[in-house]
Image (cartoon, rainbow, N blue to C red):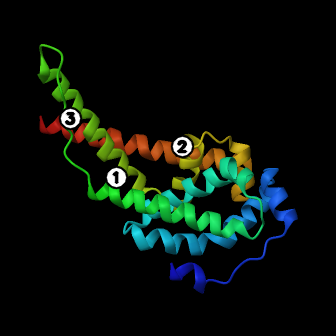
Amino acid sequence: MKLAKRAKPHHYDHGTLQALKARDAETQTLVWKAEEKLLLKIARYFISCNWDAKALLQDVFCDFLFHYVDSVRSPQAIRNYLCIMTVRRARRFKERENQKKPIEVLYDTPDPTTQIESLIDEQSLYIWMEEALCALNHKEQKVLKLHYGHDLSYSAIARLEGMSKQAISKKVATGRNKLLRHVHRKQIIRQSRQ
């Protein structure tokens, strides 16, 4: 892909690689900031929605830092590994989006209307949560994704983001409250229409 060739390469040494393998938060943050622009360009090449591209990138970087960094043997391979992970996941994401079909449900119970109602409620909740997530600012989205999606502690997120533990706690609480208020508002509107 031409994007990777045009970007300035970052030269990492063995100390950087060892620090990443040791889960050093400062090194993780530096590598993340150095590679974020390029990886976001790659993700946006495949994914049109900016929020989806950023979410995918957060997943890639978290998986790299906490799982795949141990398999990297050369410091020069860090950027290439991240680029390959981003391209593969973005392509898979795009393929899944293109193949989305309506949900088909098989009913085993004698009264399928209760399942249909619960399915509608689940679908509505999913749509409402998506809308609510898009309404959050980037920092709130990122912190919620890291905390709930990757089960990271407040202190681990604080080290990655270069913020205090209290600030992360406040961002999580604010984001969670915004999500709950949005869903609650949607439920009230739906009930008033019935």
Give, as a three-letter code, the residue at label 1.
Answer: Glu
Q: Residue at x 68, y 40 (%)?
A: 153
Residue farthest to the top, as pictured: 110
- x%, y% of residue 141? 51, 54
Question: Label for residue 21?
Answer: none
Left or right side of 183 for 31: right
Near mark 3 (Cα within 10 A), the count class, few <14, some 14-19 or many ≥20, is few
Question: Label for residue 131?
Answer: 1
Relative to 76, is 51 above or below?
A: above
SS assignment at label 2: helix
First along the sequence among labels 2 and 3: 3
> On the rendered image, what quadrant is the C terminus found in?
top left
Near mark 1 (Cα within 10 A), the count class, few <14, some 14-19 or many ≥20, is some
Residue 34 location, quadrant: bottom right
Which residue position holds label 3?
120
Give, as a three-letter code, the residue at label 3.
Answer: Ile
Q: Residue at x 84, y 57 (%)?
A: 18
Which residue position holds label 2?
149
First along the sequence among labels 3 and 1: 3
SS assignment at label 1: helix
- x%, y% of residue 158? 71, 51
Q: Which residue is drawn at 81% across and 54% down?
A: 24
- Residue 163 visible here: no
